[in-house]
Image (cartoon, grey):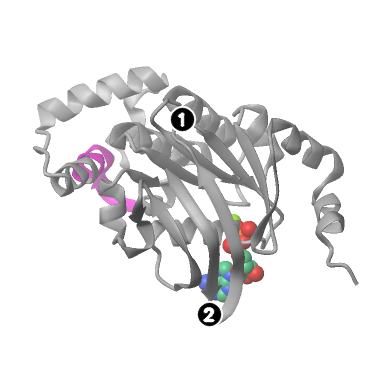
Amino acid sequence: MLKIENLHVSVAGKEILKGLTLDVQPGQVHAIMGPNGAGKSTLGNILAGRDGYEVTAGSVSFEGRDLLALEPEERAAAGVFLAFQYPVEIPGVNNTYFLRAALNAQRKARGEDELDSMQFLKLVRQKLAVLHLKDELLHRGVNEGFSGGEKKRNEIFQLALLEPKLAILDETDSGLDIDALKAVADGVNALRAANRAFLVITHYQRLLDYIKPDVVHVLADGRIVETGGPELALELEEHGYAWIKERIAPEA
Ligand code: ADP
Ligand code: MG
Ligand code: MG
């Protein structure tokens, strides 16, 4: 589904990703862990198509298409969900209106009919029930004054509405409390499906107490340096990232 090969990415002339290779199959949850500054968010940003990141070598294909050649909207239409596309606060813009616009933009790009407000509300009710969420966040401005946990619940709700094939969640390193981690974990668990894959980028071993990933990767110094099952996250918990650094230290 997602195939990243020997990816090299530079930011402001500095090489951050240095030959990253990753293969994600439908139905799988992959966790990408790693120390601060390893390049985790850079990976998320390059997959999202954010400006300022330069691919100097390697390739990324999604269902056989060259993902890097697609505009961010085209990536969304192809079924790639990037959580950080929508974390902005837009005070005064009603969240329901915003979510409907996002969904309809995606439907339009796929040549599907747009949903009217009745159809959309019906869908919203279904998704709220699946996620055991209340509708209170829908009536507020987009992310306006949302707590960390509320932002995460909203992000998961976007994910449920857009029904991506591949969801990439970057749980940035600061400001996530246990509420927010649980919101992410509950959402991922509720939305796991045979035709959907997740790439969960996290600094926190703790998140993986709630999400059972199929595959865990350690990203350090711009490369995947270790791949394993859920037990790898536990080993990291026990030994810390210093353990990985020792193992990958270049031989003198
Ligand atoms: P992580 O998410 O693993 O903590 P990042 O991908 O955010 O790591 O950052 C990796 C490295 O790239 C860091 O050294 C960071 O300072 C650098 N970096 C990231 N974004 C930028 C940028 N826009 N300009 C300059 N350096 C950047
Ligand atoms: Mg960081
Ligand atoms: Mg980061």
Foreground: disc 2 or disc 1? 1
Q: Secondary structure at mark 1?
A: loop
**Outermost residue to the front:** 64
Q: CA distance from mark 2 to mark 1?
A: 35 Å
Task: Give the residue displayed 34% in from the left and 38% down from the top.
Answer: 164
Residue 94 falls inside the magenta stretch: yes
The dot on residue 173 is: none
Image height check: is 207 above or below 12?
above
Q: Secondary structure at mark 2?
A: loop
Percent across and percent down for residue 251 are: 88, 67
Is tag 2's residue or tag 1's residue first in the polypeptide sequence?
A: 2
Q: Residue at x 55, y 69 (%)?
A: 8
Q: Amino acid at mark 2?
A: Ala
**Foreground pick, 175 / 191:** 191
Judging depth in this view, the residue of 216 and 45 nearest the camera is: 216
In the orientation shown, which residue stands out farthest toward the right?
252
* Residue at x-position 44% and y-position 73%: 52
CB at disc 2 and ligand 1 closer than 8 Å:
yes
Chain part drawn in magenta: 88-101
**Label disc, if present, on residue 27 of the rendered structure:** 1
Residue under numbered circle 2: 12
Q: Image height check: is 7 above or below 125? A: below
